[in-house]
Image: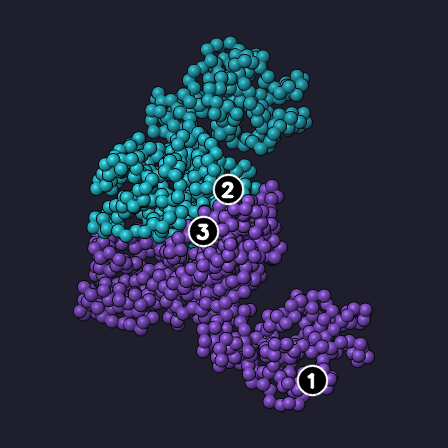
Chain colours: A cyan, B purple
Amino acid sequence: MAVTIVDFLQANAFSGGHDSLRFIISRANSSNAHSKLVRAGFLRQAHSGIFHMLPLGQRVQSKLELLIDKHMAKLNASKLALSSISSEELWRKSGRLNSSASELFHLLDRKEVAYLLSPTHEEEITSLVASTVRSYKELPIRLYQISRKYRDELRPRHGVLRSREFLMKDLYTFDYSEEQALATYHEVRQVYARLFDELKIPYLIAEADSGDMGGSLSHEFHFPTSVGEDHIISCMSCNYIANEEMAESLGCKDILPTDSDPGYGQVKVWRGISQDRNTLINAWYPSTPIEDKMISLEPEINIHAIKTLVPDLDTTLDNPVSIWVEAAAQRSKETQLINLVDSRLPKSFARQLLAHDTVLPVWPAAVAASDQDHLVSVLSVDSTNQSLNLLRIRDGDSCSHCVDGRLKVQRAIELGHTFHLGTRYSAPLKAVVSVPIKHLQHNSALSTGELRNPESTHSCTVPMQMGCHGIGVSRMIGAVADTLADEKGLNWPRVMAPYEVVVVPGHGLAAESLEVYDTLADRSLLLNVAGSPNIDVVLDDRGLSFVWKLQDADLVGYPVVVIVGKSWKVARMCEVQCRRLKIREDVPLDGVLEFVRSLLVQL
Amino acid sequence: MAVTIVDFLQANAFSGGHDSLRFIISRANSSNAHSKLVRAGFLRQAHSGIFHMLPLGQRVQSKLELLIDKHMAKLNASKLALSSISSEELWRKSGRLNSSASELFHLLDRKEVAYLLSPTHEEEITSLVASTVRSYKELPIRLYQISRKYRDELRPRHGVLRSREFLMKDLYTFDYSEEQALATYHEVRQVYARLFDELKIPYLIAEADSGDMGGSLSHEFHFPTSVGEDHIISCMSCNYIANEEMAESLGCKDILPTDSDPGYGQVKVWRGISQDRNTLINAWYPSTPIEDKMISLEPEINIHAIKTLVPDLDTTLDNPVSIWVEAAAQRSKETQLINLVDSRLPKSFARQLLAHDTVLPVWPAAVAASDQDHLVSVLSVDSTNQSLNLLRIRDGDSCSHCVDGRLKVQRAIELGHTFHLGTRYSAPLKAVVSVPIKHLQHNSALSTGELRNPESTHSCTVPMQMGCHGIGVSRMIGAVADTLADEKGLNWPRVMAPYEVVVVPGHGLAAESLEVYDTLADRSLLLNVAGSPNIDVVLDDRGLSFVWKLQDADLVGYPVVVIVGKSWKVARMCEVQCRRLKIREDVPLDGVLEFVRSLLVQL
């Protein structure tokens, strides 16, 4: 019980020494969570989009790492540490060097060899496993690391939510058949859900697009937050939830009432061009008042939906119309025009378009009237008779997965991502294993032609089926801060708090506060009561005023604050505060440990 | 007691999952420790001088980090995590950008801002502390991190002993007076010694030169090892110990016996030039048979000793003689020749030199005989009448710190370094605090003129007194491996072992081995016997042969190996092996925990 605490600034080995810098930070008023993290001394910007984690932030980060380690152990995943420096040569092999070029930090060594700072480690881990694993008997393999990653963001912002140097957990899985890889995938998804459950913060699991990462199955784990840069679409009736790129909708069922030409005010057109530059696409959609102000500055049209209908759409060109008009003027090429009509426009509108019986500009202004006869105008209607929704999904749109469900759009921030990669990396980097054919008889590898180099009639060589699964550790700190902060300060879930409890001593109550601290920190209880977790408590014995310390405790966001003040002087009671649970209660010394424990299990 | 271990490869949360890659590595024969680390699956080269830590290596690294954390807590130091990316601008301010340029990895971001990968963090931490600390009351501050550092080595070698990406612990201390900073320095040095004590490997603490780091007081912590690149000089009689740059010696007292001209065979000359290129230096020294083969390829001359006598010596030029001859030919310049004579040459030799009464080439061959008269030849003798030792210190040279002591030269590898930096960084980066003058009355800051901007008659502003203190974490892994490896494999001190004990099951003894494992891993004992550390044990339940596993256990270097084999079948005894303590003993199940503990405390 003899814990000597010389000074909270320096603290001691037991309570942890965390506080050399924090207290001098000025109290400029600021509302967002990032400035609270800076003011409270969790982190500090070093360079644009690059941060130092100060002692308080380092403690939060360590706790998050421990939480991740615990759940990775449940997956029987082994921890390693891959180099942060990778080579351009390796990334050229995987085909990602060019596609990711602008976001990579490149560096040359003194021999002019070209390296890069890895934003993610698919290439390195695949190359490592390819060089060591030969047989299907050595699989499954599950390897993860928690390490710094680098991305030269065009616009780093919101502190650690979008930074250029950040900590990420990346897990890589290797199986020899797609069935097993998919089973691994679902196991990881479940463990991710249990990990997120421990934070006790609402989260969304959304179907996602694999994008540049490759692969075919992907989910994102999000916190809903106003500073998020993703839009998550969820149904208010069924379980459907997806990110915007993947989301499907029947659109708004409110069709424009008139059967006559809807005219300029009610219809808008968006024009695009095909990759071969011969086809112009007109996407006709209803002009509706923008209700969701949050997305008002972004395009109304859903490019993903148009791509589904016109797969060779080229979205990289700024001036599709003039390029197509130029092609059409040559007449030698088979230029054409495709009209897509959103289902919310009146059915008669499509007929009017084909007959050119509309005041709306079917042809771009630059196409001379004399040329229009030579050009083919096609109306694309959905062959399956489903309705076309060309607009980005908005609150109130109809769900395509249930009968009457309406969709909700939420801003959110992505914190975790699971990918089934298949052979996206194992094939080009030749990460293969030998498998007996009998193990593959029902395997997709045989049918999809991935089977290569049959070695004999008994076994063959197949590329490994991979998965990769990330959690943004730095970003999680920013997102949790943002989600739980209130006007008084930050608020941490128990598992991520720098300390679970702070003891704040009133004036002249130093010895009594130490007694309270010792009661809460008592390790002998742990030894007798197996399974009962110890409390991570700190004593604020800095030479600062009582009021300052109380405000600071709120700003830092300790889950529980124990005050040895007025109530102690009157009745030897501790005042236990919990802002999140809205609790403020006087508790006698011999009941304080149990009471604090009862609060912590809810946080 | 119900620990289910499905497979050692995947292991479980309790025993830790470490073994997905290791076992397939081929058994190529190799003698050095680095290849053993690679063969046993601790690490793998990714690129030249850049390594991945595999699961076994990651466990060793984590344990070393825990050991460091424990000792840093004794110093009341707080842990943080500074960014790996620093800016050229900041390094320009400190004056290190140019001096370290060739070893820095430089990178430009997309806006062409010049960054670098930090090899060490004096600039960043000084800048951080400068921006937050204002008053002497906020000091002392002690901050450390364990993070990846970068150095673009000209010749990366010996695996993690000299790599380009490596893990380092760096502690920075801030005080407001030199007295306090020196007290901090000595406190750190003592804690370093206790940390090294825990490894139970002999080490050397040597006086060292601060070099490019700046500052005036410095010690190095070394392991003696044949692959080391430093030479540590220690006296076999007194406590004197220093690295080669700092070491002093009276030289070998064996003076050449003859008083006549010693002639070509017995005398050698080394020639150097001054920075103004007007002075040629002849250093005459006895030609002795090279006994120490380890250093036979390196220069015999002690450049540091010559620099002490000729401070403006230019060591960067390849052809000093021709440059000086050119200067001498112009005659307009005041060219001169200085002769330095090692004390081991006969006293008459110096006289012979001045009189040109020697067959030895006093002038370089390129100086025409007719010119020699115009040139000044000077003999430099030591004014204090001390003997001159121009040779690198060798085994058997005389100690300058005791009467009859002889020196010993050991190859060693530097693992820790403590520096008292003074104001080397705080002055240029303006890390200053306000201090009441009464606290500085006996302070060197007043006398050395560091006192700046007196604010009033009561207080003034002084640059903080800093210290920096490193431990090479990656390098420690390589050095420990090298120091303790034998022909059978690696050998780890208990505090760094990936697991302290491995249980190897004989054929058909899976259930019995699990019982042994459970006995050793029993956590309930920990709960009742406070302070008794738990044993970190792993069960090798892989599907490989018994003999293979025994060899693998030796290669990996677990401190203790417990075999459930022949003795179990005969008498239900475990065979406990410890290669380092040369122990192989049969122990009954109910005594195995105590016996293993008794071995571990010695390791």
Residue B48 coordinates in the image, percent (x, y): 53, 59
Checking the image for residue B140, the label placed there is 3
Tell me which residue sits at (47%, 76%) in the image: B235
Q: In the rendered image, which quarter contains the N terminus of chain B? A: bottom left
Checking the image for residue B274, the label placed there is none
Closest to the camera, between mark 3 and mark 1, is 3
Closest to the camera, between mark 3 and mark 2, is 3
Residue A126 to residue B241: above or below: above
Q: Secondary structure at mark 2?
A: strand
What's the residue type where badge 1 is placed? Answer: Arg
Residue position for label 2: A45
Q: Quadrant of residue B276?
A: bottom right
Farthest residue to the front: give it. B457
In depth, the one of B330 and B113 nearer the eye is B330
Q: Secondary structure at mark 1?
A: helix
Q: Left of B158 or right of it: where is B541?
A: left
* Whether residue A191 is visible: no
What's the residue type where badge 2 is placed? Answer: Gln
Question: Label 1 marks which chain's residue?
Answer: B
Residue position for label 1: B351
